[in-house]
Amino acid sequence: MTARLVFVGGGPKTTGLLLALAAAARADRAAFPERLEILVVDPFPAGGGRIWRHAQSPTLWMNSLAEDVTIFPDEGAEFPSLSGPSLAEWAAGRDLEHLGAPAAGLRGTDFAPRRIQAEYLGWAYARAQQELPDGFVLETVRGRALAAEPLGDRHIVSYEEYGTGHPHDSAHPRGPAAPGGAGTPRYQTVLADALVLAQGFLEVADDAETAELREQASRSGLGYTAPGYTADVDLSGLPAGEDVLVRGLGLAFVDAMMMLTEDRGGRFERVAGADGSADGPVVYHPSGREPVLWAGSGRGVPYKSKLGHRPEGLRIGPTRWLTADTVRGLCGADGTVDCETVLFPLLEAELAHAHYAELATRYEGRTTASAEEYGRLFADWHRAFVAGEPVTAQRCRAEWIRFAEWTVPDPADRFDLSGLDRPFAGASFASQEEFEAEVAWHTRAEIDRAADARYSQDAAVFFALVSAYYVTRELVGQGVFTSADRIRNVDGRFHGLFSYIASGPPPERLENLLALHRAGIVRFLGADVRVRVDAGDPAFVATSGAHPDEVRARWLVDARLAPVSAARATDTLLRGLLEDGHLLLEDSGGGAAKLVADADCRAVRPDGGTQRSLFLVGPSVAGGVAEAFTRPGIDGRVFRENARMVRSLQHVLSPQRASTAAPYA
């Protein structure tokens, strides 16, 4: 008997599932069909997929240390698994200089170019294929899935297969997935006993603001670049020497900054310091092809630098106050909690306690109190909070703040979540230039602090925030937040805070930013930036809540990813399943609604039933695990999701259900 399993998408999500499938089949071969044909369809090379493909600029880096990245479960995991190396372990001893790694080799504390991650993921995909037992046949097709038509419990999957030389083999693919010069694509149809939709980050139709900006720009003869994955965005039309407004100062901005400077022939150089040391400032040597980037955002400052130190004893681990049990215990009759009144107070306590406990434990003189004294104050607050005594809880919160003021002499050593999140909130400057000078100073101070082990309380907050984020994502998967609340406050506010504090760029990239600022190529636009179109004298006009000046330019770049939205996805296969009533969008999600799947990743229909052989994974699934790889040693949720899903696939593909999987035409 033969069965067929089809994956739409061949990126790291599918790679992880194939590794789990190979492990499960080796542990219990009889639980699977005698012959299992596995088909993976993706326009991009399998393993890395679109985001982690090899064909992108070497200036585009990961923002995690090489030692903090793995696609393999931890050794000793409860479910059958294939163990394997982290990115750093895999890279050790390999010659990766041609991929952008230092000539001396990639170290665990390096930030790898994404092309190296592409090689690692491609190797892991090949490893999964090698580990599949006899009778399992994996076919990988470069192409695009077009439709999936249900046929009983199975699906007729249609796709077009590309030849070589299509745009997805270049560093900057343009337009829709198309064979481009490779001749007419071959159209294929197969019958899938199980279908896994793992397309990753989906292209989405414009939201109202983006559509209006496109229309106004077109009408006024202006240039507008909409949100998108930066490596795929065409920035070639931005002219040298012209002013360009940029909205966003996060990772997408950093990518665009490198593509418009070093990728255009400029060069960064670290020069000798005043004392003759090799630790002097970074200087940028322009090529003359760079535009002038006027960058601003809501905060007005770049994301915080990744830390340059990792104090002993600090790690991602169990949370103390923002725990799953605490949050579930505060759920109302409908089984949900409110982020504003439950999640964020617990988060503040988690981060503040981590900060002060580290300050009291590791240093003398930075606080006159002990970690135990701080612990008692936070425990008093937590008891009142979970008991539903808001007045007492508010009093206890005020007490821990006053206690810190009394016992921490230096205000810079006190924890202030609002100030941390919005460093220029409420600040007013006389001009854009005055604001710009302050941001340059702030960024320099952030780089220096991130490299200074004397500020290990920042590392404590970092690890507490990452731990709290993992707990919150678990709670999302359990349906503890309403769709509207999750979109606004978890996907929005909490994720924004997490990205700013814990998912910023490598410090080298902020050094590059300051070098470009000194060269006059990057200007800091302001905080609370707003952009409008002046149709009378055609230009984009940017204003800031931090100063009174306007900045005008004929070009605007939205340097950010469009929000994840299955409701606005342009993927033809998904659109067809949605329009034909085979998939369910979450309630109250509006234009940001995601797809609904059960705990085993099986698609849910609009009538509430589940699609027994249709599986949904990735960032477009409500409550699903967005990431495909994680840190070693933390029992990553992604691996547990992979194991659950493979058990479901095993049931669907069991010998008792397997069919003769001949092509359907």
Image: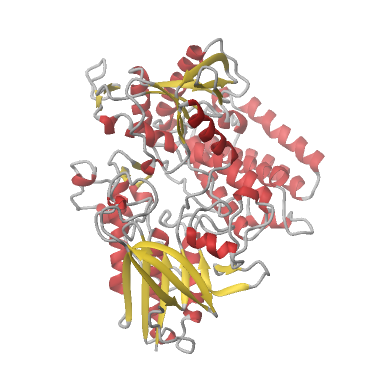
**Horizontal and vertical percent for residue 339?**
68, 46
Report the quarter where the C terminus lies.
bottom left
Query: How many numbered discs, if any?
Result: 0
Query: For this view, does 614 lie left or right of residue 97?
Result: right
**Residue under the image location 60 percent in, 59 percent down:** 477
**Horizontal and vertical percent for residue 656?**
48, 89
Near-viewer residue (115 or 342): 115
**Residue under the image location 64 percent in, 56 percent down:** 324
Query: For this view, does 285 lie left or right of residue 447?
Result: left
Q: How is the image coloured?
A: secondary structure
**Residue under the image location 60 percent in, 20 percent down:** 545
- For residue 512, what is the image quadrant? top left
* Residue 535 position (above or below residue 131): above
- For residue 73, what is the image quadrant? bottom left
**Residue under the image location 57 percent in, 32 percent down:** 421
Query: For this view, does 307 lie left or right of residue 425?
Result: left
Can I make out residue 108 in this image? no
Query: For this view, does 258 lie left or right of residue 347?
Result: left
Can I make out residue 389 in this image? yes
**Horizontal and vertical percent for residue 354?**
56, 41
**Horizontal and vertical percent for residue 574?**
52, 61
* Residue 387 position (above or below residue 257): below
Report the quarter where the N terminus lies.
bottom left
* Residue 200 position (above or below residue 648): above
Q: Residue furthest top?
A: 430
